[in-house]
């Protein structure tokens, strides 16, 4: 498994891999901002936006590929553009394909994001995740500090509202 930075989403194979990864994650119940089933228009629009963010340098996109070159995981760093925030970034969309979960890949992607953040001079990371999901123990186990919960943060497809858990990690 190799983790690399994707600097452009112009390669159709890379884009197809990212589409498949997001679709697998959303349709498998991951809390990443979409309701299942994830349709092609929403998937395309999301990655088009990410492509622009990557191109502008506002977002760092890291991806894990297996020995066959298939994308099986990804994570993003949204770099704070504000004058008072050049030291911080937000970890977003940590995705691991369902066939590759429970093997430490999520932790490796998180560590790679932290390493890349350090290399960019970022000393504070933040993230949030849906309360009660498997990502909560992952972040705690990786040394992230829970700040608290925001009740009713997400609205699910059935209309129910759920809390998000907010974390930070000084680097």
Image (spheres, rainbow, N blue to C red):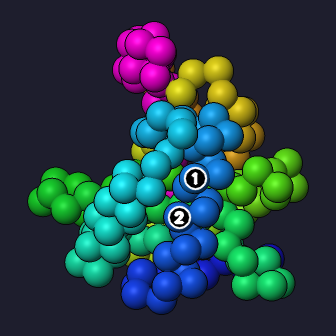
Q: Is residue 154 above or below residue 68?
A: above
Q: Position of residue 145 (x, y in %)?
A: 56, 34
Residue at 73% x, 84% y: name it: 69
Residue at 42% x, 71% y: name it: 60
As drawn, the residue found furthest toward the bottom would be 11
Q: Position of residue 141 (x, y in %)?
A: 74, 40
Dominant SS in magenta: strand
Q: Are marks 1 and 2 in contact (CB under 8 Å)?
A: yes
Figure disc tally: 2
Q: Is residue 32 above or below residue 48?
A: above
Residue at 46% x, 22% y: name it: 157
Q: Which mark is residue 23?
A: 1
Residue at 32% x, 68% y: name it: 48
Q: Quadrant of residue 75?
A: bottom right
Residue 141 magenta-drawn?
A: no
Do we see residue 130 in this rendering?
yes
Residue 151 magenta-drawn?
A: yes
Frontmost residue, 52 versus 12: 12
Q: CA distance from mark 1 to mark 2?
A: 6 Å
| Helix, strand or loop at mark 2 | helix
Q: Which residue carries the number 2 mark? A: 19
Please provide the residue range marked out in magenta. Answer: 149-171
Frontmost residue, 85 versus 43: 43
| Helix, strand or loop at mark 1 | helix
As drawn, the residue found furthest toward the right would be 103
Q: Residues within 10 Å of mark 2 (few under 14, many from 20)?
A: some
Q: Is residue 164 above or below residue 108?
A: above
Q: Is residue 7 left or right of residue 129?
A: left
Q: Residues within 10 Å of mark 1 (few under 14, many from 20)?
A: many
């Amino acid at each position: 498994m190799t983790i690399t930075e994707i600097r452009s989403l112009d390669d159709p194979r890379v884009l197809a891999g990212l589409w498949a990864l997001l679709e697998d994650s959303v349709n498998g119940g991951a809390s990443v901002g979409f309701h299942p089933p994830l349709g092609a228009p929403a998937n395309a629009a999301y990655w088009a936006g990410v492509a622009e963010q990557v191109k502008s340098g506002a977002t760092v996109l890291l991806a894990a590929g297996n020995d066959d070159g298939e994308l099986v995981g990804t994570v993003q760093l949204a770099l704070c553009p504000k004058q008072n925030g050049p030291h911080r970034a937000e970890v977003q969309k940590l995705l691991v394909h369902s066939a590759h979960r429970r093997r430490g890949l999520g932790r490796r992607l998180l560590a790679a994001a932290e390493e890349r953040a350090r290399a960019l001079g970022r000393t504070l990371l933040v993230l949030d995740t849906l309360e009660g999901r498997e990502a909560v123990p992952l972040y705690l186990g990786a040394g992230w500090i829970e700040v608290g919960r925001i009740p009713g943060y997400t609205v699910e497809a059935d209309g129910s509202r759920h809390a998000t858990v907010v974390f930070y990690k000084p680097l």
